Amino acid sequence: MDSAGPFVGRLFDRVGPRAVYTLGLGLLGTGLSLAAFGTALWHFQLSIGLAVGVAAACLGNVPNGTLLGRWFKARLTLATSVVFSAFGIGILVIVPLTQLLIDHVGWRGAYHWLGGIALTLLVPLTLLPWRRFAAGSSAMGKSVPTAGEGSAAWTLLLAMRHSAFWGLFAVYFFTSTAMFAIVVQVVAYLVAIGFEPIQAATAWGFSGMLLPIGMIVVGWLDGLIGRRSSVLLSYALSLIGIAMLWLLGHFPNAWLLAAFVVCFGGMLGSRGPLISTIALRVFRGPTAATIFGAINIGAGLGAALGSWAGGLLHDWTGLYDPVIGFAALSVICAVLPFFLVPELRR
């Protein structure tokens, strides 16, 4: 999904939000519908992996953040947090709905229903006033910021020569590395230290409810205590959560488990709106979505590395402590750009 960010961003910059969202919803419905006929692995790799993956990028953070950047200024982070939090809320609705459909019509029927719903939504989607949405707020002004001190507007190549681009890329990369090193193994870890499987799964599942709350709270704090302070607070809470997870291995109890879920689970997606706001303000202009999409690649690479490295460390040592230490180190690396890159220190 994140690797499609530059493609989606470029498409958004060139043809606007209507085409991007229509393509995304169309691919989502088509991919899910075709998956119902799958009989081999490659069928699902194309329908779910490729079609639904690109669809998620078309309906995800890059176009959403870019469009919001045309409408909000002082409260952009909070607005972005509310919109991005819909992902967590959607999971709470879609997961039980999918299970209900599987129970009644089987997994193939569930794919048919979900795909059909997505394709049906194309009708109201195309009727929305997208030209007005794309125009943005008149209060935002029409001026196009230039790249540094020169007269040329931002391009992807110019942005890639700027420290802010690689600083934000590193933030996304190391944040995803830290989160996915933990996320893919947390239930197994809790079971290994003595919790019942259903208790471990339920406790971690509760983090899905905290995801939208954490995003909105951190977005609200951005306007209250400042962006840099909000970012550092969110990372501090993630580190506290990781520490609680380590302590659970030595003193397993429900209170430490709750503290871990609240601190770590509640902050899982909280940095996304903050980072997108910074990116869209530094690189604001006609190619903002393309640049933001390229920065998003860092998140995908970090997720891949974190999942792989976490599993490898556990396989090598037979222990979870190295995985937890690796995640904590990655969080620290994610914070460093906010001290080293001038645009991120402000």
Image (cartoon, rainbow, N blue to C red):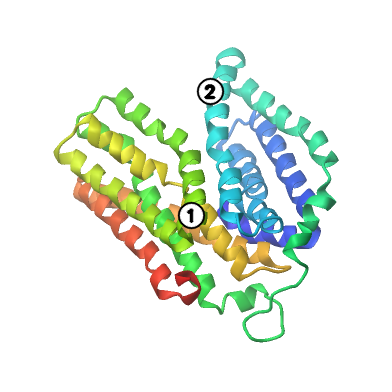
Which amino acid type is shown beneath numbered disc 1? Leu
* Label placed on residue 154: none
Q: Residue 283, image x and y in percent? A: 63, 70
Above-or-below relation of 239 to 169: above
Question: Label 1: few (<14), some or many (≥20) within 10 Å?
Answer: few
Q: Residue at x 51, y 49 (%)?
A: 220
Above-or-below relation of 306 to 13: above
Residue 333 versus residue 189: which sits nearer the camera? 333
Q: Residue furthest bottom?
A: 150
Residue 57 versus residue 136: which sits nearer the camera? 136
Assign a secondary structure to mark 2: helix
CB contact under 8 Å: marks 2 and 1: no
Q: Residue at x 63, y 42 (%)?
A: 52
Residue 300 visible here: no
Residue 9 visible here: yes
Q: Residue furthest top?
A: 104
Which amino acid type is shown beneath numbered disc 2? Pro
* Label placed on residue 96: 2
Q: Residue at x 30, y 52 (%)?
A: 239
Q: Residue 222, image x and y in percent? A: 49, 55
Disc 1: which residue: 224
Q: Residue furthest front?
A: 224
| Camera-side mark, 2 or 1 | 1
Q: Is residue 110 left or right of residue 235?
A: right
Q: Residue 146, image x and y in percent? A: 68, 79
